[in-house]
Image (cartoon, rainbow, N blue to C red):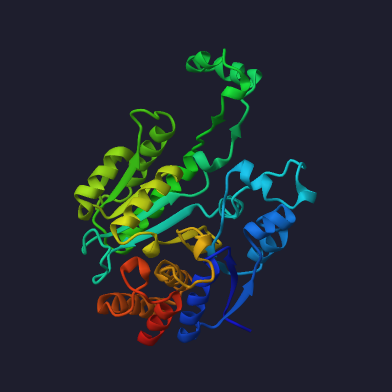
């Protein structure tokens, strides 16, 4: 019996290409694991009206963790049009499989390392090394939304909040409402994750990024709880900044920061900015981590126009694989892979199109494998 059971979900488009690259590296490392293929993504939405089939949910329950490629997502109306004709008109609504998996399995910590590798021509600076901790289950991604916003709903809110009254005279179809929901528990545990990481790896600071001067209740709750958690880590200073100012400061002084922690939507935004500082989404891995399960994926999309062309940069996928190895306790393999990534990029011999080269996805994977 294999030591590890891993759900293997390539997903859509170039997700298949980069997962093939990951398999080359894992085979070279000799990871003792059973990889079990799962169905997920756009094709299953079109054929079955469900991008995350129940059989795949069951697969999560039977495995130690998941390695995920990429998926295609489209707005509500476009998604409806692409359904099989037999499924149209049934009220089916597309929902992101990744967001659903995060919430279903309480993968509350989205960890996104952003490290500049020497030799990467796309680096903003060569000395950037940041880690973003993004709360992964709540906030604006909670999915509590209303359209059209009925008169009854708006009147009920107006009874409790005077600022809703100016929206009461509008037609229902002219108003949409999305709810930004924070809980004390979620705020506490994501901040605690950030501090624990900083403590374990000797990072010098933790910065909480919110907007409490305007979004007073939800951002306010996050900042207040961050201050309480920080009291348990007296050797690690807590810095506080607003999301808009942080975008500016990261461009101006990126090396001033170490571990960043924030809520779901702000985390999505700030981690993409950090990714661009170190070369773009081709270098941006992530781990969706809970107490009992984890799902690892590159942060880029499925790039359908490049599907099957083996053109895209697999580094984010390989870095996500490294994060998975580390989470599984395969520390030596993870470090070997980290060294291989750094060496290949530093040598500047094998590069995909985004780096100004002409090598393929699999060329990069094979070069990483050689260094192992």
Give the image location of residue 179, x and y in percent.
53, 33
Position above or below: 230 against 21: above
Q: Nearer the viewer, residue 41 or 324?
A: 41
Question: Which quadrant of the figure contains the C terminus?
Answer: bottom left
Q: Along the horizontal axis of the image, is 16 left or right of 131? A: right
Give the image location of residue 36, x and y in percent.
64, 74
Position above or below: 336 against 247: below
| Location of residue 61 (image quadrant) | bottom right
Do we see residue 231 in this rendering? no
| Location of residue 204 (image quadrant) | bottom left
Query: What residue do we see at 46% from left, 86% from top?
Result: 28
Total label count? Answer: 0
Give the image location of residue 8, x and y in percent.
59, 70
Question: Which quadrant of the figure contains the N terminus?
Answer: bottom right
Q: Nearer the viewer, residue 94 or 219?
A: 94
Position above or below: 278 against 192: below
Query: What residue do we see at 42% from left, 48% from top?
Result: 268
Q: Residue furthest right?
A: 86
Do we see residue 152 in this rendering? yes
Q: Nearer the viewer, residue 16 or 2?
A: 16
Give the image location of residue 230, x and y in percent.
32, 46
């Amino acid at each position: 019996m294999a030591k590890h059971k891993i759900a293997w979900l390539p997903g859509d488009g170039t997700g298949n290409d980069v997962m093939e690259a990951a398999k080359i590296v894992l085979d070279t490392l000799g990871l003792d694991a059973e990889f079990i293929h799962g169905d997920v993504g756009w094709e299953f939405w079109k054929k079955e009206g469900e991008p995350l089939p129940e059989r795949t949910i069951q697969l999560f329950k039977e495995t130690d963790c998941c390695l995920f490629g990429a998926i295609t997502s489209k707005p509500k109306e476009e998604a409806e049009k692409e359904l099989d004709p037999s499924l149209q008109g049934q009220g089916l609504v597309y929902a992101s499989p990744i967001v659903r998996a995060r919430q279903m399995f309480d993968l509350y910590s989205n960890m996104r390392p952003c490290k500049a590798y020497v030799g990467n021509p796309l680096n903003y600076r060569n000395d950037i090394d940041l880690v973003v901790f993004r709360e992964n289950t709540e906030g604006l991604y909670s999915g509590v939304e209303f359209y059209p916003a009925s008169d009854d709903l708006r009147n009920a809110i107006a009874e409790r909040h005077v600022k809703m009254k100016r929206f009461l005279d509008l037609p229902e179809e002219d108003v949409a409402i999305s709810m930004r929901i924070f809980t004390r528990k979620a705020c506490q545990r994501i901040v605690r994750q950030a501090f624990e990481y900083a403590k374990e790896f000797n990072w010098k600071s933790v910065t909480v990024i919110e907007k409490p001067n305007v979004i007073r209740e939800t951002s306010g709750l996050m900042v207040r709880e961050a201050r309480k958690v920080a009291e348990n880590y007296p050797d690690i200073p807590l810095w506080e900044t607003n999301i808009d100012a942080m975008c500016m400061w990261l461009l101006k002084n990126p090396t001033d920061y170490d571990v960043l922690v924030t809520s779901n939507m702000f985390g999505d935004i700030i981690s993409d900015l950090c990714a661009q500082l170190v070369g773009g989404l081709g270098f941006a891995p992530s781990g969706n981590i809970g107490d009992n399960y984890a799902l690892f994926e590159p942060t880029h999309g499925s790039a359908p126009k490049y599907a099957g062309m083996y053109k895209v940069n697999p580094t984010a996928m390989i870095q996500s694989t490294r994060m998975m190895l580390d989470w599984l306790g395969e520390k030596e393999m993870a470090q070997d892979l980290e060294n291989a990534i750094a060496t290949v990029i530093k040598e500047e011999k094998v590069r995909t199109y985004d780096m100004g080269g002409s090598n393929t996805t699999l060329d990069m994977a094979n070069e990483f494998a050689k260094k192992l």
